[in-house]
Amino acid sequence: MKSRSALLVAVLLCPVFWAAPANAAPVHPQVPAAVAAKRVFMVSDSVGLGAVSAMPRAFPSDWQVTVTGKPAQFVEQLVDRYVKPMPASAFGDNALVAGGYNYPYWDVPRFDRSIDQMVNALLAKGVKHVFWVTLREVKPQFYTGYNSLTAGYKLLYSQYPVANARLRAALERHPELSIIDWAATADQFGLTYDAIHLNPAGAALYSGLAASTIRTAATRKPAGTTTEFTVAGVAGVPADASAVALNLTAVSPRTSGYLTAYPCGGTLPIVSNLNFVPDQTVASAAIVPVGANGKVCVYQSADSHVLVDLNGAFAADSGFIALAPARAIDTRSGQPPAARVPLVVHLGAIAGAPTGAFTAVVNLTVVGGSVASGVALYPCNAAPPAQPARTIAPGVVQNLMMVAATDDNGDVCVTVSSPAHVLVDLFGAFPLGASFHALVPQRLLDTRGGYPLFGATPRTQQVAGLGGVPGSPLPSGAVLTLTLLNPAGPGWATIYPCATGQPNTSMINVVSNREQTNAVIPAIDGAGTVCLYSSTTSHVLVDVSGWSGAAFLPLTPARLLDTRIG
């Protein structure tokens, strides 16, 4: 193995270019607030400097973007040479740091100190929002084509996940700091010359990712915010609606946290619909009771943008029983359930739940263990489904809205394929006489045996007459779960009735090579079909777990809330 000094020489000689300030703003003694809000000061080592031309182009023309720095610099050198000497008038509200590739792996506390030095130096210049781009985590397959790469490079690359972990840890020390997760986005081929340095395609993606986060930073809602909005009488929702089918999305959260949707006017429940991690865009479906004032509230535990899309409604005579959202089970106080051993969850004990068997609307949350785990939820008097409802990555918290039939005791069962903690929250119920029916989940589509769903190419999927869904009369909607497997790049996907055309909303957001799952209740068109659309090529799974007659009113998907635009 190379010595530390030899490794540093290798890093210092990396083939990149010096970048002068690009589209730099003139220096004034005082910067007007409107100008400062649209200024970005970017300081970078070699990787970010590969976007010196692309970064200004990623912003609207009324934004001022300055890019400076030098290859092969430690973070503390960038602070001393390219931040501290600059006058405060050269900065605005936003700073972008793209440093850390020259990571002192032999002295992790030094990297922590350099993060603090950079953030504090920028704040001293009047910067309000500091964004730090995570390092590309270089997998062996990304550099196998570069046989000239030394053992020293490979050793350095192996430490980038540790560096990214230190950046995420710094979020707790610096409330003005956010990360931009290039590591997650860049988990694909075709973005670099040598596993880290950007080619034109990589520079464009890198810059667009940074610009989309920075431009909306000022309107991101702070932790502890409860946003309320009217749903009754809006976008086709009946004025007397008892509940609505929503899709909740967290965009660019600053730290880990959760969203909870509940009827306004009630007490904030100790449950969640959606869990997220820093700078992850993730969505989860929810059936939410409507408050007495016709409103729904969304609480967020962390700084994040929040999007809420409407998919349908349940009228007052639908049979839906609105319950105060309540937690039925949380295994985190003890040992996680053993693999393939059914965990009995007594939903009938929740206040207001029907007696005996009923159809439950639940949110299933799984805290991934040391290895990936599949999870299934089903009536205890039925055999477990052949396929899991979703797969949970190690150490990740994932949610899934499910509709499940209970047994005569009001119980459902949960099984995991490997130990993982499980939380089940009850949000509502339907009596057995209602025209909303749960099914033991069955798989309708699995493309892994053939061609994937190609990006930007809709695919028709038959639903009526399959998996327990009646073919005649046609149901109004079906409870479907969509999973994207190993997507080729970042993107989004949705399910919609083919006859109405593709909506301008989404149900899943993905990054490269990461599995993601969400549920939806789309309308079934006259042919008994729905359409699948993904903006990126991916294998897909589609499962059905219920269907509805007159109880559910499918609506043209509409966006009710988007904090990115105020």
Image (tube, rainbow, N blue to C red):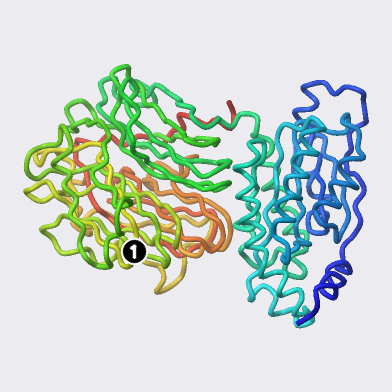
Q: Position of residue 266 (x, y in %)?
A: 30, 23
Percent of width and height locating residue 76? 82, 51
The C terminus, quarter of image: top right
User: What residue would you read off at disc 1?
Assistant: 374
Image coordinates of residue 132 in percent, x first then y, are 70, 47
Residue drawn at point x = 34 percent, y = 38 percent: 271
- Mark 1: few/some/many CA within 10 Å (<14, 14-19, 20+): many
Residue 469 location, x and y as percent? Answer: 20, 53
**What residue is drawn where x is 25% and y is 47%?**
329
In this rendering, is residue 558 above or below 513? Answer: above
User: Image height check: is 291 above or below 299?
Assistant: above
Could you tell me which residue is drawn at 48 percent across and 42 percent down?
257
Residue visible at 80% across and 73% down?
Answer: 4
When asked about the image quadrant of residue 228, the answer is top left
Query: Is 35 on the left or on the right of 293, as rendered?
Result: right
Q: Total number of numbered labels?
A: 1
Identify which residue, 528 or 243, lies in the foreground. Answer: 243
Under circle 1, the secondary element is: strand
Q: Nearer the viewer, residue 403 or 477?
A: 403
6 sits left or right of 434 in the view: right
Task: Name the residue type under label 1.
Answer: Gly
In front here: 460 or 61? 61
Quarter of the figure with the N terminus: bottom right
Question: In the depicted view, which residue is nearer to us: 111 or 146?
Answer: 111
In the rendered image, the vertical position of residue 202 relative to residue 63, given as above or below: below
Is 192 placed left or right of 429 in the picture?
right
